[in-house]
Amino acid sequence: MDLSCFKAYDLRGRVPDQLNPTLAEKIGRAYVEVTGAKKVIVGYDIRLSSPEIAEALSSGLMAAGADVFDIGLCGTEQVYFATSHYKMDGGIMVTASHNPKDHNGMKMVGPESRPISSDNGLNEIRDRVLEPFADAPQQGQYEPLEVMSAYVDHLLGYVDAASLKPMTIVCNAGNGGAGLVIDELEQHLPFEFIKVHHQPDGHFPNGVPNPILPENRAATADAVIEQGAAMGVAWDGDYDRCFFFDENGRFIEGYYIVGLLADQFLRKTGGGKVIHDPRLTWNTLDLVKAAGGEAIESKTGHAFIKQRMRDEDAVYGGEMSAHHYFRDFAYCDSGMIPWLLVAERLCQSGQTLSSLIDARIEAYPASGEINRTIADPPKVIAAIEAKYGVGAKSVSHVDGVSIEFDDWRFNLRMSNTEPVVRLNVESRANIPLMEEKTQELLAEMDRLNEEG
């Protein structure tokens, strides 16, 4: 049996050769045997293969003795929400996020929506799949569960409804599932939504929803300009990530959204801890300090950030990859809470999104994440550290290597999920310096790679 769909954080693979109903049924059985779960939430995304895989998964869970609470077509965050809100033993979301349309996968959580990844159960589930199974003496029960209304009520609790004013927002669900939530929220908000690629459609007629790819941004940007909207928001297929466009249709780097959300959240809480990743940091550190909070660095990746948030009781955590985590959302990531907070900030401040962001880009210009395919990543990273570490103000190994000087810094790390090295560079109020150092580092990486 091909178990290559088991990854570090979740399952992803092609249907049917790497993931299919037969394997999904066994995964359900193995999940119960490894975790001991008795009550499990199951949800699925808009992919054409998702209902069948979710049904087979549910059969396996019930055969192993667990009760299944089926929340139907949803986003990953609704599985997180339902698992914690209804105090279930675990939850499984059938999704392949932004992978190609012939792929599918699963994201698994335990009690309190704690992630299940390769270091705390996922490898055991993978290994257990290969062994024979016997049915549990008592079969589990199946129950459909409606969570949308409780989930929407929860989302609305993050914003002060009285401070919201009418404005136009472009929303691009990418034919994923986000449109269903927007339709529900719309009834409670004074905003006019311009809906782009709104209908859920697993054929992905407008391409796989992944707004991080520049070629996927035009539809949102163009609609913002045409409609004179205050901002644009686009999501990936299972809408656990959201991406922002200002009123000029400009795509905003996720790094600057982390700072904006940290600031907005700390204004509400009057302080608290904020978790951030090490790739780009200065803007976040500056805003968190100014808002009376404490910034804490964590290794990149949702399992690491969620654990660190729990350890520190942090109110908010943000990654520049457009994952945003909230203490009151079971420390999980949501693609809906961030845009609600940004919209609230626009209403309260009377400022445009571009003016809020421009000030931060000028203060801390950044390269954005640049990926390079490198034959021997550890060797290249070590050589870069040996060269640049000399005379640096600080060298950190929280995630890859971060090297800091008085007026610029960079982070270089291997991807957790792809065979690439990722570079991020930023400076203090000096765009030419940031651009110069970015080119210098890329040239050095290329040279080292050619040397082999």
Image: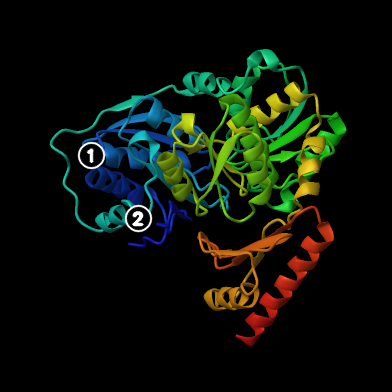
Report which residue position mark 2 lands on. 119
Report which residue position mark 1 lands on. 63
Q: Quadrant of the C terminus?
A: bottom right
Question: Dot 2: what SS?
Answer: loop
As rendered, which of 293 and 206 lies closer to the eye?
A: 293
Q: CA distance from mark 1 to mark 2?
A: 26 Å
> Which image quadrant is residue 311 in?
top left
Task: Name the spot of residue 255 as percent of width and height, x first.
Answer: 67, 47
Q: Which mark is residue 95?
A: none
> What residue is at 68 percent from the left and 61 percent from the top?
409
Q: Are marks 1 and 2 in contact (CB under 8 Å)?
A: no
Q: Residue furthest top?
A: 162
Task: Name the spot of residue 323 as percent of width and height, x first.
Answer: 57, 43
Task: Name the spot of residue 282 as percent of width and height, x first.
Answer: 67, 50
Give the mark, 1 or 2, whose residue is nearer the N terminus.
1
> Which image quadrant is residue 406 in?
bottom right
> Which image quadrant is residue 180 in?
top right
Kindly identify the amino acid type of the residue bearing the numbered disc 2. Answer: Asp
Kindly identify the amino acid type of the residue bearing the numbered disc 1. Answer: Ala
Question: Dot 1: what SS?
Answer: helix
- Reply above or below: 449 against 123: below
Q: Residue furthest bottom?
A: 451
- Reply above or below: 352 against 218: above
In the visual, does 389 lie left or right of 119? Answer: right
As rendered, which of 135 and 154 lies closer to the eye?
A: 154
- Reply above or below: 376 against 402: below
Packing grade of label 1 (10 A; few <14, some 14-19, many >=20) is many
Please say whether residue 105 is visible from this viewpoint. no
As rendered, which of 394 and 253 lies closer to the eye?
A: 394
